[in-house]
């Protein structure tokens, strides 16, 4: 039977409850077989992560212990080249059955930036795109995406058929937490307890991560 696999990329610098709850809620809502968190090594679109890839990976692995729906995929960290999503999708596809369904999760802002991504028009050959939309958002898609949306969007994410090719929206209220906020709290010596799993917090303290001004 075709598997349903979600993927969520990010720097996870560090992973927090916003990522984890968001991922779990999408996995349950979409009845996924698994949702893979994919830490990026050298993100093409943003600043270099503050801590080493090995630490970010270790924290994500700790965070998903005991949650069978969430998995960690370290392929981008094993690659020498920049982490282009298209490369990740092609490499995932090479391991899956032809009819397995892949769902790439993107926040609305990331989705709007799609036209600047490497080979972005090929992404839908490999996956469906699920855009995570805030219920209060009233943003308009950029001009460059209008035709694509007209041709490929589907109002009902649960009705997406086949291995890929369509775009749908999931309305989700994100928890008010970000890695930036966590880094800044830690840099000023404040507690980040309850913003991320205790196991991740223990790792951060044991390895002296995110100390000092940034
Ligand atoms: P930073 O604050 O360093 O920019 P971040 O917390 O936004 O980091 P990323 O690693 O960039 O984390 O997150 C990867 C993806 O996780 C984002 O593109 C977004 O879709 C999702 N995400 C981030 N924060 C939340 C949140 N609070 N709730 C739900 N999803 C989130």
Image (cartoon, rainbow, N blue to C red):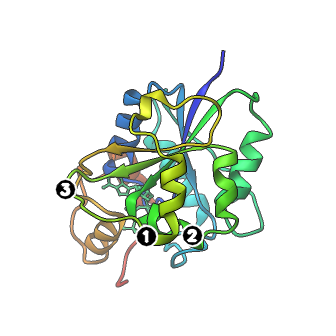
In this rendering, the label closer to the viewer, 2 or 1: 1
Disc 3 crowd, CA 10 A, few/some/many (<14, 14-19, 20+): few
Residue 191 in the image, given as x and y percentages of width and height: 22, 62
| Depth order, front residue of 16/171 | 171
Q: Are marks 3 and 1 in contact (CB under 8 Å)?
A: no
- Is 174 drawn above or below residue 128 in the view shown? below
Question: Image point 54% across, 47% down: which residue?
Answer: 152
Determine the CA span between mark 2 and mark 3.
24 Å
Residue 174 in the image, given as x and y percentages of width and height: 27, 51
User: Which quadrant of the structure image shows residue 114?
Assistant: bottom right
Which secondary structure, mark 3? loop
Question: Image point 78% across, 36% down: which residue?
Answer: 95
Picture quarter with the C terminus: bottom left
* Disc on res. 142: 1
Residue 48 in the image, given as x and y percentages of width and height: 55, 77
Q: Quadrant of ligand 1?
A: bottom left
Determine the CA span between mark 2 and mark 1.
9 Å
Residue 161 in the image, given as x and y percentages of width and height: 57, 28
Which secondary structure, mark 2? helix
- Residue at the spot of label 3: 136
Picture quarter with the N terminus: top right
| Depth order, front residue of 107/20 | 107
Disc 2 crowd, CA 10 A, few/some/many (<14, 14-19, 20+): some
Is there any visible trace of residue 13 in the rendered image? Answer: no
- Residue at the spot of label 2: 115
Q: Are marks 2 and 1 in contact (CB under 8 Å)?
A: yes
> Quick check: is the Cβ at mark 2 less than 8 Å away from ligand 1?
no
Which secondary structure, mark 1? loop
Return the disc, 3 or 1, that comes first in the chain's sequence.
3
Question: Image point 54% across, 25% down: which residue?
Answer: 33
Q: Would residue 185 be found to the left or right of residue 56 on screen?
A: left
Return the disc, 2 or 3, that comes first in the chain's sequence.
2
């Amino acid at each position: 039977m075709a598997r349903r696999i979600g993927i969520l990329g990010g720097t996870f610098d560090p992973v927090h409850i916003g990522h984890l709850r968001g991922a779990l809620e999408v996995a349950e809502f979409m009845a996924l077989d698994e949702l893979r968190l994919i830490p990026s090594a050298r993100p093409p679109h943003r600043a270099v992560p503050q801590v080493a890839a090995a630490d970010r990976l270790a924290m994500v692995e700790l965070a998903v212990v005991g949650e069978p729906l969430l998995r960690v995929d370290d392929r981008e960290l094993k690659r020498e080249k920049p982490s282009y999503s298209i490369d990740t999708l092609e490499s995932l596809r090479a391991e899956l059955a032809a009819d397995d369904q892949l769902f790439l999760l993107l926040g609305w802002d990331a989705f709007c930036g799609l036209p600047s991504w490497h080979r972005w028009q090929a992404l839908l050959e490999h996956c469906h795109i699920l855009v995570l939309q805030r219920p209060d958002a009233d943003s308009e898609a950029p001009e460059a995406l209008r035709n694509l949306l007209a041709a490929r969007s589907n109002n009902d994410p649960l009705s997406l058929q086949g291995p890929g090719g369509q775009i749908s929206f999931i309305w989700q209220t994100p928890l008010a937490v970000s890695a930036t906020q966590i880094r800044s709290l830690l840099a000023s010596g404040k507690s980040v307890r309850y913003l991320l799993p205790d196991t991740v917090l223990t790792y951060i303290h044991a390895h002296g991560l995110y100390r000092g001004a940034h």
